[in-house]
Amino acid sequence: MSCPRSSGCVFHQTVGTSVVKRVRYASVFSYCRGGEHEKCALYRSMADGSDIRHNLMPDGTVGDYRDERSLGHGRRFLIIEDSPVFAALASSTINSNFNGAQVVRAASFETALAELAGDWAAIVCGFGIGGGKTAHDVRRHTEAPMVILTGRPDHIELPRGATRVNKGDGPEALAKALRACLS
């Protein structure tokens, strides 16, 4: 079932006409075509008659679908992850969701230490990052927004201001958390 407001929706009009953007935003484009329009932030704004924030996504985060240059353009992301598989997943997620982003990867806290003084749009970090170090050690060296990518099933105390994404939640969960950091 398509959204009844799609003809007046800037997201639907912009993304729906581009195959590349429909693939890039497939998980949130489902609000337009998947019968979830009442959960859509744009739908609710149009129904309330309120102003729609620039680049507002159906899930309530902010993307870059209306900009010629991407939200990620020129922004730097640091990934601190000891698993090569999840470091590659995070890197791929950033590159596919934030065009022009610069991604630096470090496999441990020790490797990342020299990089932490840099200007980062966001840091994606495992909770345990080798050598007995955790994401809390990273927080002591930077105030950059942090997304903690973890496979720990138990409750963990996150560093101040950090967002948790479970490794099993997939790339869209990471992209959503990063978009929220950049909003």
Image: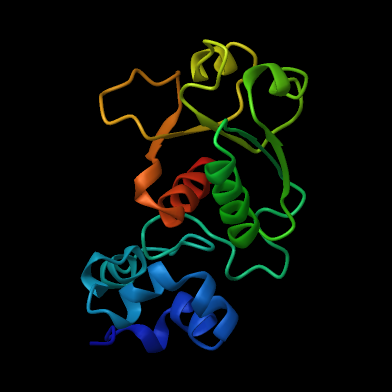
Depth order, front residue of 22/66: 22
Q: Quadrant of the N terminus?
A: bottom left
How far across and how far down the image is residue 112, in percent? 70, 23
What residue is drawn where x is 25% and y is 25%?
154
**To which quarter of the image does residue 155 belong?**
top left
Is residue 73 depicted above or below 42 in this figure? above
**Residue at left offset 55%, top offset 50%:** 89
Left or right for 96, reference 175 = right
Q: Which of the 4 image quadrants contains residue 85?
A: top right
Residue sitting at x 26%, y 72%: 47
Q: Is residue 182 visible?
A: no
Q: Is residue 98 above or below residue 148?
A: below
Q: What is the tally of numbered marks visible in this picture?
A: 0
Residue 116 x/y as whole percent: 71, 22
Q: Position of residue 110 (x, y in %)?
A: 69, 16
7 on left or right of 75: left
Residue 140 can be seen in this image: yes
- Closer to us: 40 or 125: 125
